[in-house]
Amino acid sequence: MITQPAVPATSPAGLTNFATNNTGNTAYVTAGANGATMANYWVNAASVATSATAFMMTVPPGGTCALQYTVATPVWFWSECTPALPASTVAAVNTTGRDISVVFCGGGSVSAVTLNGLTTNVTQAPTMNTQGIPLPAGASIAVTYTGTVAWAWLDPLSSMVLAHSDASVYAASNTVAPTGANGFSPLNTLPYTVHSQVGAPGLAAGVAN
């Protein structure tokens, strides 16, 4: 799973305001203008594209990537498994072994998305499709598009933060400080009235059977 870093501020030479690929694997970073005027896409401070409204950067382990832009802030999606986008109408197969979510970005338009040979009802500008199209393991996807379009294949867990009781990410370490003479107890945190029989927090007053 790749954590999605925030898009840094514009970087005139790719030497400042960059993000580093600390995943240990090659990262495929799909960036879209999202209303910005793009000037450069940088990988290890070398320009790999200029004014394209969408582009996928291949960032090696330990490498850096940066964007040079004005007007608005672009969007980007980091993935460990995004293949090159085939030509319009040409299918690609999900060989990752995982269920994937496919998002689009760029200044072009997508007029049809076909999954396993069946046309879906997705017809929209790529900049509007940030929720993702489910692509099960082993399924094929073909995109009919015009103009500049890029895609990203995401593990859904890479694009969400799961709520947790004591941290922002699910299964994070417990950071709740001990409270009371006997240390932390979930019973002492329940917002319920004291149980009438034992003087402890509970769901309701005791009921005689």
Image (tube, rainbow, N blue to C red):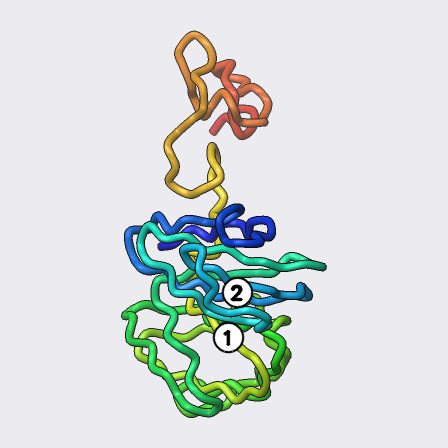
Asked if the residue at tag 1 contacts the one at tag 2, i.e. Cβ–Cβ closer than 8 Å, the answer is: yes
Q: Nearer the viewer, residue 26 or 209?
A: 26
Residue at 59% over, 75% down: 126
Looking at the image, residue 184 sits to the left or right of residue 41; the answer is left
Q: How many labels, in total?
A: 2
157 vs 16, left or right, is left
Residue toward you, 122 or 72: 72
Q: Which mark is residue 150?
A: 1
**Distance from the alpha carbon under mark 2 to that under mark 1:** 8 Å
Position of residue 120 relative to residue 188, above or below, is below
Amino acid type, label 1: Ala
**Marking on residue 192:** none
Q: Mark 2 vs mark 1: which is more N-terminal?
A: 2
Q: Position of residue 54 (x, y in %)?
A: 55, 71
Residue sitting at x 46%, y 69%: 56
The vertical placement of 67 against 196, above or below, is below
Badge 2 amino acid: Ala
Between 43 and 19, the residue placed more toward the observer is 43
Label 2 Cα neighbours within 10 Å, binned few <14 / some 14-19 / many ≥20: many
Q: Position of residue 148 (x, y in %)?
A: 57, 80
Residue 97 at x, y percent in the picture = 28, 70
Secondary structure at badge 1 equals strand
- Dividing the picture into quarters, in which one does residue 65 lie? bottom left
Q: Quadrant of residue 108?
A: bottom right
Q: Split into 4 quadrants, where in the image is the N terminus?
A: bottom left
Residue 102 percent coordinates (x, y): 46, 72
Left or right of residue 154: residue 128 = right
Q: Residue furthest top?
A: 181
- Residue ID for mark 2: 31
Residue occupying image coordinates x 63% and y 78%: 125
